[in-house]
Image (cartoon, rainbow, N blue to C red):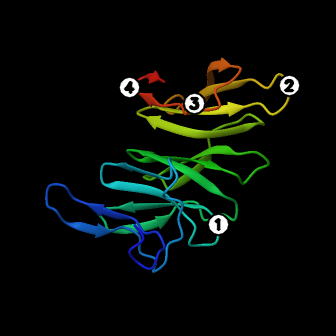
Amino acid sequence: DNRNGGLLDVYAHNIQTGIEERVTTGSTVYGQLNFPGQLDISGERVVWTDTRDGNNEIYLYDFSSGVETNLTNHSASQTEPKINGDVVVWTDKRNTYTDVYMYNILTAVTARVSRTAYEQKSADLDGDWIVWKDSMTSPPYTKSIWGYDLPNAGIDTMLTSTIDYSGVYPVVSQGWVF
């Protein structure tokens, strides 16, 4: 919403009560919320990409506590946040290539999820699985969808491999990857 002078803020509207609430606490939030994949919600929590600190950061707002938190606080760019329960994932550019990172809300621990030396991005998560697309940037230039099994010590596995999926954004739900 740009009702505060053309800069984007996040507002939530409770369908049952009709109450609208401003989620972001900064007086001016520079955001990229008009791009797909920059905002997600799970239960009482919402995550989004925010540039108020001068670069793309991932923020979390918890409706039950009313607390807004910068989850990434890093000079590199972080985008494409997704949340499911107590886990947040995003695309992170703190290394040479983009990687997938996760944050556990209960333990306040951030960890790198993807482990290959290529471009990993567009993560999704559901239950015990995190999935993302991986693009090899050297021959044979294969593209694949990888999965990360949370309960099994975070073992990551290539789930599919193809030559071109440039428009594909993997989605996981109840053990199925689309």
117 left or right of 123 in image: right
Q: Pointers 3 and 4 in contact (CB under 8 A)?
A: no
Which one is in front in this view, the residue at disc 3 or the one at disc 2?
3
Which one is in front in this view, the residue at disc 4 or the one at disc 2?
2
* Location of mark 2 (residue): 139
- Helix, strand or loop at label 2? It is loop
Which one is in front in this view, the residue at disc 1 or the one at disc 4?
1
Q: Pointers 2 and 1 in contact (CB under 8 A)?
A: no
Label for residue 168? 3
- Helix, strand or loop at label 1? It is loop
Q: Residues within 10 Å of mark 2 (few under 14, many from 20)?
A: few
Instruction: Give how far across and how far down residue 15 sits, in percent.
Output: 19, 55
User: Which comes sooner in the sequence, label 4 or label 2?
Assistant: 2
User: Which comes sooner in the sequence, label 2 or label 1?
Assistant: 1
Which one is in front in this view, the residue at disc 3 or the one at disc 1?
3
Q: Residues within 10 Å of mark 3 (few under 14, many from 20)?
A: few
* Location of mark 4 (residue): 174
Which of 129 and 91 lies nearest the eye of the viewer?
Answer: 91
